[in-house]
Amino acid sequence: MLLPIPDVLTSDQVAEASRVLDQAEWVDGRVTAGHQSALAKDNVQLPENHPAAKLIGEMILSALGQNALFVSAALPLKVFPPLFNKYQGGQSFGTHVDNAIRQVTGTPHRIRTDLSATLFLTNPDEYEGGELVVDDTYGTHSVKLPAGHMILYPGTSLHHVRPVTGGARICSFFWIESMVRGDSDRTLLFDLDTAIQTVNAVQLTGVYHNLLRRWANT
């Protein structure tokens, strides 16, 4: 399931993130890439332990915890601390798939990357190119969302970022380990939850929770 999630951050939060990130020092983005990804990756990134990354990352995690659409779609068990990247001057990221397991730097904690997320922090009219392109069983999807909006997609997906030929594209990206590992199972639960909220049927609610009880690993 590939799902846009609007208004994860408010316009004021986006402005604050931009202010903080404009003052930060960026490094070569390949520092967090696996071997194959490093061959395709050309961008800059905030170090994971950078104070700006921690500050804005906590803002994002707090917002996600209050976002009903994200919770319903992802059924999150663990969320990787948000990372931040910037593309400009023709930079891009070639086709790749995200690592299956990510280690949280400086901790013993690891997460399984069931879902990938990209949260846009610059508006589409602020840069040229830079679309996130995701390939799945339903075809190829090109994504370029307003600042504060996020795209959620399976971690198993092949994806790439087209060259940014003007301006600068700044995003946060991270991964989610879901209580329900299978994408098709999560999609079924999400569709059912959406139907429940639409028709407010007690019986459908029971079906949803029985399926979640059956599939969830907590």
Image (spheres, grey):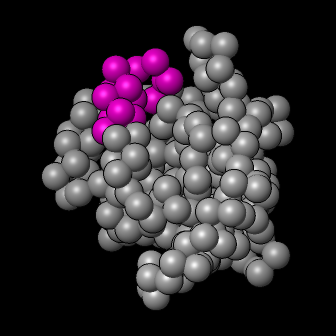
Task: Please determine whether, in this image, residue 189 is positioned above or below residue 178.
Answer: below
Residue 49 is inside the magenta segment: yes
Front-lying residue, 95 or 205: 205
Task: Please tell me how many numbered marks the rendered image carries.
Answer: 0
Q: Which residues are magenta?
A: 40-59
Q: Residue at x 27, y 42 (%)?
A: 17
- The image shows residue 215 at horizontal and vertical percentages of 76, 54
Q: Residue at x 60, y 70 (%)?
A: 206
- The image shows residue 127 at horizontal and vertical percentages of 39, 63
Residue 209 is inside the magenta segment: no
Quadrant of res 59 = top left
Can residue 2 be seen from the camera position used here? no
Task: Please determine whether, in this image, residue 123 is positioned above or below residue 90.
Answer: below
Name, please, the residue furthest toward the bottom: 199
Q: Residue at x 38, y 26 (%)?
A: 54
Pick the quarter of the image with the C terminus. top right
Can residue 49 be seen from the camera position used here? yes
Using residue 40 as the reference point, say whether residue 192 is left or right of it.
left
Q: Residue at x 76, y 34 (%)?
A: 101
- The image shows residue 98 at horizontal and vertical percentages of 74, 45
Task: Please determine whether, in this image, residue 104 is positioned above or below residue 119.
Answer: above
Using residue 79 as the reference point, say whether residue 115 is left or right of it.
right
Quadrant of res 210 = bottom right
- The image shows residue 118 at horizontal and vertical percentages of 52, 54
Quadrant of res 111 = top right
Pick the quarter of the image with the N terminus. bottom right
Front-lying residue, 193 or 200: 200
Front-lying residue, 34 or 211: 211
